[in-house]
């Protein structure tokens, strides 16, 4: 029996029907591990050692029931755990970055690698694969944004550099009387960078979330936007649909997967629209439960089981 530590949001925030961290934790229990948790506020460094205020977790009644505290809180060095799993949801803010500095000193396996969580921005890391992506630019000057719109045929997406969950994703179109307002919102009047990305018509049919475990694609789900909605994230009303990996998807995964593994990213979710890679999600990717349900996956065939096989190989 091994002690493992999850760095997560408060337990009451974990939805037993939707949250990927939830099934990671329940799978840890199924495999005989002892899962503890802490929040960012519980992390710290004392005497040069990374430490945390931790609590053992258990299920309230059984699989599918909420996670609850199963023991008293206690301070422990992170090195006393077989591994630490960083599953704090975005935003990637000052507290998140500080947590990765603490995790640098964990003295044990950390998933995903803290330095990679700092370095691999989810909107920009795909720029390492120019042959796989649509025209994507990081801009702040309003004139540059307008020039990009013209270059992209008069239609593009703008989204915050540190955005998440589909928040503040906007469609910019030439001739729109609100274009100046959209640019002002996207750049906060020229005080922050925005990601300008070529609009892909296939986005109307949804985007494909592909889960990558230890460099390999293990499953995928199509996220379909609600009627009249631009965004397809589950947080913004998108619905899951069964899908399969196309030859182009496999080509993308064959390029991106090994690159992620080399950088210490054991678990990632990449987003693909049509033939294009649009994001690489490494902080706290979701999609496990939707893939399990749509595929009727159980036991060792589930996404979380495949994840834990890879984790245990590193312990």
Image: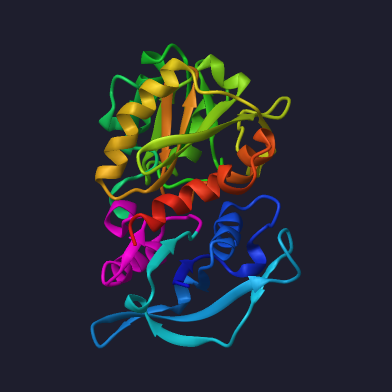
- Horizontal side of 131 relative to 192 (left or right) equals left
**Residue 139 placement: quadrant:** top left
Task: From this view, report whether residue 5 is shown above or below residue 189.
Answer: below
Vertical placement of residue 63 versus 264, above or below: below
The answer, for residue 217, to whether it is visible in the render is: yes
Does 4 appear in magenta?
no
Q: Where's residue 218, x and y in %?
A: 48, 36
Q: Is residue 285 left or right of residue 225?
A: left
**Which percent across, then down, holds residue 68?**
66, 74
Residue 92 part of the magenta segment: yes
- The vertical placement of 15 against 278, above or below, is below
Residue that extends furthest to the top in the rendered view of this protein: 153
Q: Is residue 181 visible?
A: no
Q: Which of 253 and 272 is in front in this view?
A: 253
Question: What is the quadrant of the C terminus in the image?
Answer: bottom left
171, 142: nearer the viewer: 171
Colour style of the rendered protein structure = rainbow
- Where in the figure is residue 252, as x and y percent of width and height? 37, 25
Q: Quadrant of residue 223?
A: top right
Residue at coordinates 60% horizontally, 55% vertically from top-left?
A: 23
> Camera-side residue: 2 or 136?
2
- Number of marks drawn: 0
Residue appearing at x 49%, y 80% in the figure: 54
Q: Which residue is drawn at 76% across and 69% down?
A: 61
Residue 208 screen position, x and y as percent: 54, 28
302 or 14: nearer the eye? 302
Does 2 sit left or right of 61 as displayed? Answer: left
The magenta segment is 89-117
Residue at 73 percent across and 58 percent down: it is 64
Quadrant in the picture for residue 291: top right
């Amino acid at each position: 029996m091994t002690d493992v530590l999850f760095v997560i949001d408060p337990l009451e925030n974990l939805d037993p029907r939707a949250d990927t961290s939830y099934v990671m934790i329940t799978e840890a229990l199924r495999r005989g591990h002892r899962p503890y948790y802490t929040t960012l506020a519980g992390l710290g460094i004392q005497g040069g050692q990374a430490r945390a205020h931790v609590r053992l977790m258990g299920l309230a009644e059984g699989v599918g029931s909420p996670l609850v505290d199963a023991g008293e809180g206690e301070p422990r060095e992170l090195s006393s755990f077989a591994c630490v799993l960083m599953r704090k949801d975005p935003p990637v803010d000052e507290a998140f970055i500080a947590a990765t500095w603490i995790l640098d000193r964990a003295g044990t396996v950390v998933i995903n690698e803290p330095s990679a969580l700092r370095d691999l921005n989810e909107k920009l890391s795909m720029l390492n694969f120019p042959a796989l992506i649509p025209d994507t630019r990081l801009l702040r000057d309003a004139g540059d944004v307008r020039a990009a719109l013209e270059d992209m045929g008069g239609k593009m997406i703008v989204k915050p550099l540190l955005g998440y969950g589909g928040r503040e994703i906007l469609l910019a179109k030439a001739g729109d009387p609100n274009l100046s307002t959209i640019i002002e919102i996207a750049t906060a009047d020229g005080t922050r960078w925005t990601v300008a990305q070529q609009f892909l018509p296939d986005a109307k049919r949804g985007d494909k979330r592909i889960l990558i475990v230890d460099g390999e694609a293990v499953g995928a789900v199509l996220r379909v936007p609600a009627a009249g909605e631009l965004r397809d994230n589950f947080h913004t009303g998108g619905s899951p649909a069964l899908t399969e990996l196309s030859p182009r998807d496999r080509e993308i995964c064959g390029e991106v997967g090994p690159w992620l593994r080399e950088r210490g990213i054991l678990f990632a979710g990449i987003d693909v629209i049509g033939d294009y890679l649009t994001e690489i999600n490494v902080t706290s990717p979701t999609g496990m439960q939707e893939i399990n349900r749509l595929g009727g996956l159980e036991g060792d065939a589930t996404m979380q089981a495949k994840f834990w096989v890879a984790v245990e190989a590193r312990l």
